[in-house]
Image: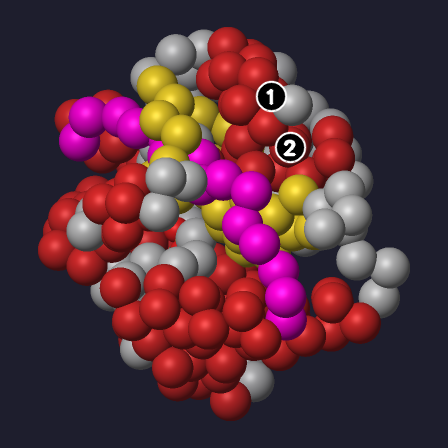
Amino acid sequence: MPNETNIIFFGAPGAGKGTQAKKISSKLNIPHIDTGSLIREAIQNTTELGERAKFFVESGKLVPDQLVIDLIREKLIVLKDRNYKGFILDGFPRTIPQANALEHLLLELNIKLTCVINVQAPEEILIKRLSSRRICSNKSCGAIYNLISSLPKEENKCDVCSSKLYQRKDDTKEAALERLNEYRNKTAPLENFYRDLNLLKDVNGTKDPDDVYNEIVKFIS
Ligand code: AMP
């Protein structure tokens, strides 16, 4: 297969997989497909998907499998049609049925996974990180800050584009706890799924984000 890189970023909410996935996607110049952002955008635009997903997202629950499977199927088919170089999947799959559906889709499209980056961090760190996370409200920027470890230079203002920062509705403590609960019950079993396929690369997500990035770069180069 010609120079393709097809990576899944896997990890609990707050592990830092989104930040790293974004950086690796721009380093490799391949699309970053982030189901969480796609679903939030659909909610904002009140599309049919958004209307069906809203309740689940805001209460910290996973949205039904078929909704995300259809979303990813559509994205990958369009992507494969163009000058295909690969993808970064962030936040998908999150359940065993999603992983099985992805396996079928990849087979159908003749795509081979390069690796699954497993960003790990203990729960007490995840809860702290989620409730102190702030995000740039400018969609084309989307920079991520943290009121404990990665403060913006000016309060509530993005360093990159000066837009206002906001807190996601599902980053409140109550919703964050529910998201971790969903992760434990439905997503964590995927670790063994991909370990058995010999694709899982464990990364320590408690380290400085630059060190985490360098570790990931080592795995993929
Ligand atoms: P994230 O931005 O990745 O933390 O995702 C935010 C929310 O979007 C999750 O808590 C779920 O409600 C929903 N979501 C994102 N990806 C998936 C997925 N693969 N399966 C089910 N729900 C998802």
Disc 1 marks which amino acid?
Val
Q: Which residue is mark 2?
A: 24
| Spot occupied by residue 83 in the image (x, y as percentages of width and height) | 86, 59
Please say if the residues under marks 1 and 2 sit with CB atoms less than 8 Å apart.
yes
Q: Is residue 80 above or below residue 65?
A: above
Instruction: Depth check: give the residue in front, 206 or 191.
Output: 191
Res. 217 mark: 1
The magenta-colored residue range is: 109-123
Query: Left or right: 110 with respect to 14?
Result: right
Q: Position of residue 52 (x, y in %)?
A: 39, 84
116 falls in the magenta region: yes
Residue drawn at (27%, 51%) of the image: 193
Is the C terminus in the top left, top right, bottom left or bottom right quadrant?
top right
With respect to residue 105, does 60 lie above or below?
above
Secondary structure of the residue carrying numbered label 1: helix
Residue 162 belongs to magenta span: no
Q: Residue furthest bottom?
A: 48
Which numbered disc, 1 or 2, marks the residue closer to the eye?
1
Q: Position of residue 124 (x, y in %)?
A: 16, 26
Q: Which residue sits furthest right?
A: 83
Give the distance between the C-alpha atoms of the residues marked 1 and 2, in whole angstroms.
8 Å
- Pick whichever of labels 1 and 2 is earlier in the sequence: 2
Secondary structure at badge 2 equals helix
- Observer able to see residue 124: yes
Asked if residue 177 lies left or right of residue 63, the reply is left
Q: Amino acid at mark 2?
A: Ile
Residue placed at 49% from the left, 46% from the top?
A: 8
Asked if one can make out residue 137 in the rendered structure from this viewpoint, the answer is: no
Rendering quadrant holding ligand 1: bottom left
Is 70 situated above or below 18?
below
In this image, 126 relative to 49: left or right?
A: left
The one nearer the camera, 53 or 67, is 67
